[in-house]
């Protein structure tokens, strides 16, 4: 079969792709060689800005299938009937490292899902942990800065990390996850995923419930030790990307069982923890997991840049039957994610093939902007209201409200049992096996070894408030005699 003729970006045939047009031999090169200019100018612009967070990652396509009837709780169309399948895309990532970072770095993993539903795209942007480091979006830039490179040395600095964490006790729960076994999964297909935030589900009668999302890997949760991760970072820094890609290329699939926790709306006011605080979990004893469906990834990207690098996930992409909660971190992300995409890949990012709805028609008055890849609304008018048949709002899709109480003001939190920063981190540590406790102590001592003593004292003091034995073991490992109980110092 004869190959296609190489062309310029405007479709003209290219006579020579090996030698530039020159004035004689050996040259110089002529500016009239428009293809050489086009080729190099495009090359200079190949990279879009990398994501500020979640820069290093990969993903795959597949489907979501409903296995249980949840119409009692939500009218979301993609959850409407047992057996219904919805096309989807998943992207997994590390959080703090740049594009060149090793996949096996100790870091939370992003767990971002895009469902191509008939009511438009639904994005669920979570992590492989059910909680997060901070509960308020106003703290997010500071948290990320503490995990990134030092302004002077351009090195990541454990002093900065532990300084922020130790001054922000709300981070203890997530740090305990991060420093434990789940801090380094064996592969993306071997980790669980969580929506983390609390959302609202709405059924056809308008009744609402609060909901949390859980994805449990069907391949079994598997993790790496610190030593294994360090070795793999040298042997294959793209280990997780390669592992998932090879799994699917070999004819296997990565799959997860999807379940939810449901909280009746009226319980939120009296539950023992603030149910909208993303640094907290809901007890499974209080709100057991309810099976919903199954997520299967079975197709690798055709082109990484087009399918993964340009993929844009945002909590603002929701569908009827799903709404938000008063979670302050979630409220900030509704703005921040879409704004990041407009900066990184342009104002028309939602029109790119990977981000366009596949089973819903886009009908609005958004027009123009750089790199518009579609028909730009054609001849239709671009204002509303109009008399020419343009799209109009439909009040039947109005989301039910929820009551808000209190003055409109920033306020310092009063510490109560509902927002205690120590209980759940301690519970997580106490759930660990003896071997897992040994590993988390070893990891924290190793990670904090070079940290300034004052920061060590503050951080370990916080862990001691979570669990006295946990704190004592860390104090012994770091030689912090002041924090070891008097009778136990000998």
Image (cartoon, rainbow, N blue to C red):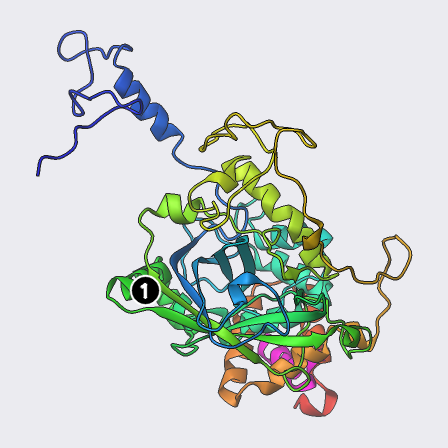
Give yes or no for residue 140 being in the magenta stretch. Answer: no
Residue 455 picture location, percent across and down = 68, 64
Q: Main secondary structure of the magenta part?
A: helix
**Is residue 57 visible in the rendered structure shown here?**
yes
Residue 216 picture location, percent across and down = 48, 75
Residue 127 picture location, percent across and down = 54, 64
Residue at disc 1, secondary structure: helix
The image quarter in which residue 285 lies: bottom right
Between residue 234 and residue 31, name the one nearer to us. 31
Between residue 486 and residue 456, name the one nearer to us. 456
Q: Which residue is mark 1?
A: 243
Give yes or no for residue 479 being in the magenta stretch. Answer: yes
**Is residue 480 visible in the rendered structure shown here?**
no
The image quarter in which residue 80 lies: bottom right
Picture residue at 41% right of the left edge, 49% below the top: 308
Picture residue at 49% right of the left edge, 65% below the top: 106
Picture residue at 57% right of the left edge, 51% below the top: 314
Q: Which residues are magenta?
A: 466-481
């Amino acid at each position: 079969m004869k190959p296609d003729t190489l062309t310029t970006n405007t479709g003209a045939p290219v006579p020579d792709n090996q030698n530039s047009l020159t004035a004689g031999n050996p040259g110089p090169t002529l500016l009239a060689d428009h293809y050489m200019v086009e080729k190099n100018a495009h090359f200079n612009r190949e990279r879009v800005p990398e994501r500020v967070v979640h820069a290093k990652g990969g993903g795959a396509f597949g489907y979501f299938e409903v296995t249980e009837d949840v119409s009692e709780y939500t009218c979301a169309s993609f959850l409407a009937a047992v057996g219904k399948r919805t096309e989807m895309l998943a992207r997994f990532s590390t959080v703090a490292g740049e594009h060149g970072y090793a996949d096996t770095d100790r870091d939370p993993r992003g767990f971002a899902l895009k469902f191509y539903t008939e009511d438009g795209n639904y994005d669920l942007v979570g992590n492989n942990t059910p909680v997060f480091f901070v509960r308020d979006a106003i703290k997010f830039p500071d948290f990320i800065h503490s995990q990134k490179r030092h302004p002077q040395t351009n090195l990541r600095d454990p002093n900065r990390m532990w300084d922020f964490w130790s001054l922000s006790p709300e981070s203890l729960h997530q740090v305990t996850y991060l420093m434990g076994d789940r801090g380094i999964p064996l592969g993306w297909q071997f980790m669980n995923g969580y929506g983390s935030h609390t959302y609202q589900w709405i059924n056809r009668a308008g009744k609402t419930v609060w909901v949390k999302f859980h994805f449990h890997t069907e391949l079994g949760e598997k993790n790496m030790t610190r030593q294994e991760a360090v070795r793999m970072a040298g042997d294959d820094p793209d280990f997780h990307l390669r592992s998932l890609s090879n799994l699917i290329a070999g004819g296997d699939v990565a799959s997860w069982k999807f379940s939810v926790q449901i909280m009746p709306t009226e319980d939120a006011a009296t539950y023992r923890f603030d149910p909208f605080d993303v640094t907290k979990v809901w007890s499974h004893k209080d709100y057991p997991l309810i099976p919903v469906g199954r997520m299967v990834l079975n197709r690798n990207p055709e082109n990484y840049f087009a399918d993964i690098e340009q993929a844009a996930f945002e909590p603002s992409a929701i569908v009827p039957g799903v709404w938000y909660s008063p979670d302050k971190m979630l409220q900030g992300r509704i703005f921040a994610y879409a704004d990041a995409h407009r900066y990184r890949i342009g104002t028309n990012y939602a029109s790119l093939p990977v981000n366009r709805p596949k089973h819903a028609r886009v009908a609005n008055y958004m027009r123009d902007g750089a790199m518009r890849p579609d028909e730009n609304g054609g001849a239709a008018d671009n204002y509303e209201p109009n008399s020419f048949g343009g799209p109009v709002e439909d009040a039947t899709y109005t989301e039910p409200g929820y009551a808000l109480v209190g003055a409109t003001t920033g306020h310092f939190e009063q510490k109560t049992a509902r927002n205690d920063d120590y209980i759940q981190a301690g519970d997580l540590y106490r759930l660990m096996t003896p071997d897992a406790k040994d590993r988390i102590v070893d990891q924290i001592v190793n990670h904090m070894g070079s940290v300034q003593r004052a920061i060590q004292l503050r951080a370990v003091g916080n862990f001691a408030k979570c669990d006295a034995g946990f704190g004592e073991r860390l104090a012994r490992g770091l030689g912090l005699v002041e924090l070891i109980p008097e009778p136990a110092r000998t």
